[in-house]
Amino acid sequence: MTEILKTQGLSRYFGAVTAAEDINVTITQGEIVGVIGANGAGKTTFINMVTGYLPPSEGSIFFNGRPIKGLGPRKLMREGLARSFQIPQLFLELPVIDNLAIALSAAQNDHLQMLRPVRTAERLAAADDILEQMGITRYRDEMVTAMPQGARKLLDIAIAMLGNPRMLLLDEPTSGVSMEEKHALMDTVMEIVKRRSLTVLFVEHDMEIVQKYVTRVMAFASGVVIKDGPVEEVLADEQVQTLVTGKRRHTRTATEQGDV
Amino acid sequence: MSLQKSEALMIAAAVAIGLAGLMSPNWLVFTTTLAVAKALVVLGVVMLMRSGLVSFGQGLFFCIGGYAVGMGGRFWGIQDALLLILLGVLASTALAMILGLLLTRYREIFFAMLTMAFSMILFGVLVKSHNLGSTDGFSVVQWSLLGWVPQSGMGVFWLALVLGLLVALFLNRFFQSSIGLACEAIRENEVRVEYMGISRRQVLYINYVLAAAIGAIGGSLTALAAGHVDPEMAYWTISGEFVFIALLGGTGHVAAAFIAAMLFALVRTYAVEFMPHTWQMILGIVLLLIILFLPKGIWSLFTRHRRTAP
Amino acid sequence: MKHATQPGRWKRTLLSTTTAAAIASAGMMGISATVQAEETFKVGLVTFLSGGASGPFGVPAAQAAETVIKAINAGELPPPYDTPGINGLQLESVVVDEAGGPTQQVEEYRNLVQRQSVNAVIGYISSGDCLAVGPVAEELRTFTIAFDCGTPRMFEELDNPTYFFRTGLDAVADNVGAARYLLDLHPDVTRVAGIQQNYAWGQDSWLDFTLSMEQLMPDADIVNNQTPQLFSGSYGSEISALQTRRPEIVHSSMWGGDMESFVSQANSRGLLGQATAILTTGESGLHRFQGQAPNGTILGGRGPFGAFMPENALSEWFNEAYEAEHGTKPSYPSSKMAQAILALKFAADNSGADGVPTSEQLASTLKGAEFESVSGTVRMALAGGHQAMQDMLYGEYHYTPGEGAELRNVRSYRGECVSAPDGQNAQEWIEAGFPGAQCD
Amino acid sequence: MLTVWAILIDGFIYASWLFLVAAGLTVIYGVMRILNMAHGSLYALGAYAAASAIGWYYAGGGSQLWMAFAILASCALLIGAISGLLIERGILRLMYGRDEILMLIVTFAILLILEDVMKLLWGTTPYFAWQPYAAMGRVEIDVLTVSGYDIMVLCLSAVIGLGLWFWLERTNTGKILRSIIHDREVSEAMGVNVRRMFTITFMIGATLGAVAGGITAPIISVVPGIGIEVIVLAFAVVVTGGLGSITGAAAGAIIVGLARATSIHTMPQFELFIIYAVMAGVLIFRPNGLFGQAIARKI
């Protein structure tokens, strides 16, 4: 088992506010890791730092054994690190097929080509393939604005996968998706993940989903990892139940605010 | 690479207009020439708009193209129109390559204001240049086209049509290409673009420099047609006019810029003639109506009943 | 404006141009426009109707044109212009806004000649527009009179013109005249400063003035020159900058609203108490200052125009008719427009043509001619007979509350004294010490 | 030494005028995210209204300075508020939610329309209301003189600046406005009537523009096109200072004012582009202007 992602003493401060502090994590190839925590606990900050969107205040990050601190999302994508977003980041006024075509062209490092059309037969086939796998083929020629939230989440994840990543970070893939759709969505995604044997780290609020899909869980609270280990062990933890899952005190509200 | 349907149509339209020019009155040929020249600058604005940027300073390159023609003929003895245009394109490209390094960091209002500032600085420099005639500008000397000296406005008319067609064909491909789509992607969502492994600044830079080069062709053709250049070409209201025409046409298709430029020229000509005191008001009202009812420009009249075009 | 609006044509144009057939359909309109009644003479009038130059220049000129054309058509002018119409034809005008810059004006000029089929064009206040339109007038072989623009480069750059004329003086005469007036009335001055609008007109004026001063009053130091932006309106900082240099004379070629604002601000700030202003276009403010300029301020009118018009039957008639119609006395731009239209009438009446005179007939009649005008007898003696040679006048502003403003100490300098001999570069002529100038 | 004093005096006087012109622009942008090009026309409207009213008052034999100021102020306030209301309710309201840059072009269209409306109402002859300016006299420092009117403009500008600051920072309405600036949707959800606040803001911004014009009218001659000249200047000031910030507008005005005065006194030939050079220079080092803040995208 080779380690793929490792952080040491990773911290981020916004002025006097501590968003994340001293995060030490090691993830090995092929692991599927869940991240839980209340809003503002530092989950998205952690993902933003790992994918290069937010520079860490302190600490170091290694991907495939190489230090990657200071590299931006663009370089990290080329290293094989991809992510999806809590709020899907899509090209709303472009057709779905073009959202995928540009991702494919970027993945082939062909995005500066000015004379050949972006929609080559080969790219269209690849795009149709992923649409089929995600089950959103019917939106192929629609604008993204015409898609429901669940389909947008899938498209967001599909785009992340088109870069042929080795590791995928999913930021709340089921937020904003109806209860009925959640499991179908995760089934779809996880099937592709398994087929490609990707390493996945995903942030999730729904403990049912967490229990169903992951083997290992990290629990965040106030910017610190309070527990890291096998699912049952972490969810049974008293501190986790108080601060995160709310089993001991209150039920979580379903607001969808970002952590940044 | 096979010819697309819209490309065949554009070639046919250019040939038809070129032939119609033989039977048209002189003023209309001239107006069409200027409209084609203007449309090229507008296409530069459209290119930037597709990437989400609005330039209030495209007059900068319009002016450089014009002055390159004027100065090349007057001071350096260059006679050939194509060489003069090339000179303008090179000068514009060189300047855009420098300014682009800075400008690609800016968006929205700041991009608009900075582009305007650079254009106004050129205006200021030219106004101060007594040798170049200050605000009066100077006239363009007699030029030739591959050894042929055109005796009427038809020479520059055909030249404008050919260059306009070439640029239109190129941009038609460009808009469908990877980098063309990357520009639109940047307009839609920069975060995602960066996560796709695309350098936003690299894409915007190339787009900006190309827009500048095309704008210079428009300026050069205007100078050849009008026979005069002056600093007003760099004044911000001229750049505002380009933005106006770009909105009028919309970013849907290259041909829209040409139709909009022609429409603008005719509306303006007739407004100036019939309502010499209130033509600005007419332009303002037209602009408001377009934004209200045709937010994607007049091109949406052509595509409204078709879903996504191939 | 008197032309009929044609909504049908409008609509047709708008619709047809959205299609690729625009060229063909609009082309037909162009042809139909030429098939018009033959018993009128159509003249295009181009002058500023919008922007900062419209108020002081463009609109007064357009109003003067209206008055004069009406009188010409009714045959109400004094002799020698008392025949109705020009060469017996009713004069019809098309007014076009000069705004938009030279390129736009070239386009409008072509529209006037080729689409509107005007027989002649009179217009152009901006020098840039004159420079751009001149070659086009020659190309299209259309009789054209520049009534106001002042650049001396016009006939330097237009080789052997046939159809293009200027019935006024160029700006060189204004500034040579200004220097001569200072020599006559303020010979002991040692410190001279200037303030000019930052564009070609201001730069050229200042250059001509300083060159002339070097020749005529070598002991006077040029201490400062301010170049505020055109239409900036507020000159507080420039006035302080001038004050710190303690000039005795402040020369300015600013015009219109800018000139009036400068005078009012400089007066309130006391600059005009410390120094005397010499305003080369000051005449247009004569009836507007209302005491805002101190008595003794030196005004010019770009020649014998406006209040500098000599007393003759034509100027008397013009003063009265203009005031009756527009409620104020004509200023120099009005007189200059009247002069240009009179030049057209002179050329047409004497062309010997049967019906509508051709541009060739008009041009050969006006070339080198002498004609009567509101400014006296005008000799087309410069630029090979294409530009007027006229006297340059300066005078001192004098305002008496209740009675209004008048000009005192008016000096007139002969055309041969303030204009370079034909074919000679004006600046070289000044620098050589005005060879051949006749100033008696 | 005389020149240094002159630069400081001129710089601050010019800065105070720039601030007057730019204040309304920055208030509207701060709350509504609209960079209002028609601000120049509002300035011109105020100037025309004030100049013609003052001219009418003095032509009718009036000679009281305070009456002239009362007329000037009421004209400018009235025309600013009315045209602000008409523009906001009649045009802008139809366009809310469009792109920031598209709103800029909408206001450009309004500017084109208003330019001709003013020509129809007031003609093209310059209006000249010099009497209040002349009546305020001058202060003499050696050969330098400072107009009393300019000193008044300086004070007025300071009062308006402080007033705006107090309004935004210390009053209830200000609190509501700041909540809208911070997050429009959340404010709306919390029961703030955003549309009404927009109307009020736009009217205040428009009135500030008209007042600036009215105050300037006695200094200049009011001619067609003054609005267009002013708007670019005001843009440069607010962009330099940081869009939407009152402090920024003040800082921008002072920097531009001093830079321009320095140029006029030492290198008059650079006056034409010094303002753009300052703006470009500031933006290169502070991409959002001196007091501007970048807005991060939510992901």
Image: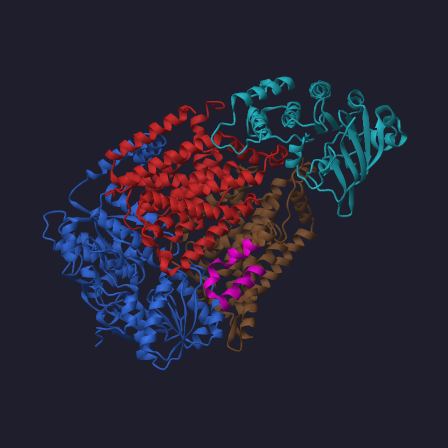
Q: Which residues are magenta?
A: D254-281
* Residue found at x 55% / y 65%: D11
In the rendered structure, the colour chosen for chain A is cyan
In the rendered structure, the colour chosen for chain D is brown
Q: Nearer the viewer, residue C297 or D256?
A: D256
* Residue B277 in picture, x, y percent from top left: 36, 48
In the rendered structure, the colour chosen for chain C is blue
* Residue C169 in picture, x, y percent from top left: 26, 64
Going by the image, does C311 lie left or right of D1? left
In the rendered structure, the colour chosen for chain B is red
* Residue D104 in picture, x, y percent from top left: 52, 44
Residue D82 vs B249, above or below: the answer is below
The colour style of the image is: by chain
* Residue A163 in picture, x, y percent from top left: 63, 28
Residue D259 vs A73, above or below: the answer is below
* Residue found at x 24% / y 45%: C113
